[in-house]
Image (cartoon, rainbow, N blue to C red):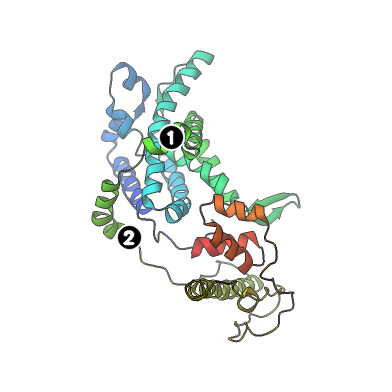
Amino acid sequence: MFTTTGSRGLYKAPLSKGLLLVLNGLTVMLTLLPQYQELFEYNLQAVIKQHQVWRLLLGRLVCLDVKDAFCSSLLIYNFRIFERRFGTRKFASFLLGTWFLSALMDFLLAQAFQFLFEYEVEELPAGLLAPVFSLYVPFYLLIPKMPVTQVLGHIDITNKSLVYVVGLQLLTSSPFTWLLALSGLISGGLYHSNFLSLQKLLFVPVWVSRIGRYCLEPLLSSSEPSSETPLGMGATLDIQRQQRMDMLDQQMLLAQYNEARRNTRQQQEQQPGLLQWTRLFPSLRHRGQNQPPMQPHPQAETHPSTQPPLLDNSPVAEEQVALLVEMGFSRIDALEALRASNNDINMATNFLLQH
């Protein structure tokens, strides 16, 4: 679903894999054993009036509705990119912080709804829904939007559209899911903006992260996928050719990008100076969809390009650099990736996310 992040399964995402296995396993188990579902109901009035605080833990982890479990699993699988980019500990801290914040927001929003409409909210949908909705905040702010196609000539379909559609499906699954969604979005915004230094108050301790790394990560880690990207099912011959050409271009540019970084480190150790980007990164080839696939030429670096090469001192759009820096990349890496991709922000993001 993320066209900018590649298809790498659950590689370098052990927490996402653990959540998918454990939570979905419990959902299936409770479906087969309905007599225990009452223990996992998210009943606000039972928490307030009967002081059943344990429902905050059980009722906000496991989905009792199979449809909710399926949609939330799709979202967790897509949002695994944040675990790869920021690390498992920061990703776990975000989920933990928004879990606590959304628990408070659930009660506040339920009381506000009762005050405004004189309707008592007794039970909310069970599951890890609010923290999942909170991940839409960094998804909206940090993941660049890339157009894929158009519907009716006016409606743009991007690489993020399907993720929003799944969230909308989850939002309409029950009458009060909107309350959890609003609670999650508010919690995600507060934690992402570090309001009142929440990131320093609600986080996963280092010692817990180390225990999980040595005990659980070997069980949940996934092997590195092969570099070959499978073609889309049902694709026409022209689409398959274009996909092969795009894949070869991407592999060649990634290899050149890695070579440039190595050369940069060597030159910084030996003598100061700028790297000759025009020699390492020729301009991208522009090819039609009906042209046959071409293998990357081993001497492509020395052949002249049909487009004017990007000079070492050519300006790089500062707003593009700022966007990549806000995503968590260093300024040096952002500049290198933009120069390597001829100032293409989408290709530069692809370089940095897959490196």
Mark 2: which amino acid? Ser
Counting residues from the start of the chain, the first of labels 1 and 2 encountered is 1
Could you tell me which residue is drawn at 38 percent across and 33 percent down? Answer: 100
Mark 1 packing: few (<14 Cα in 10 Å), some, or many (20+)?
few
* Image point (55%, 61%), residue name: 332
Q: In which quarter of the image is residue 223?
A: bottom left
Number of numbered discs visible in the structure rendering = 2
Q: Which residue is drawn at 54% across and 62% down?
A: 333
| SS category of the residue bearing label 2 | loop
Viewer-proximal residue, 179 or 268? 268
User: Disc 1 or disc 2, which is closer to the eye?
Assistant: 1
Q: Quadrant of residue 290?
A: bottom right
Depth check, front residue: 47 or 259? 259
Question: In which image quadrant can residue 214 be found?
Answer: bottom left
Give the residue pinned by disc 2.
Answer: 221
Q: Is residue 110 left or right of residue 231?
A: left
The percent position of residue 208, horizontal first and vertical second, equals 27, 46
Instruction: Bin the neighbour count of mark 2 within 10 Å (Cα to Cα): few under 14, some 14-19, many 20 and up.
Output: some
- Quarter of the image with the N terminus in it: bottom right
Give the SS element for disc 1: helix
User: Is there a contact, CB below 8 Å, between mark 1 and mark 2?
Assistant: no
Q: Name the residue under label 1.
A: 197
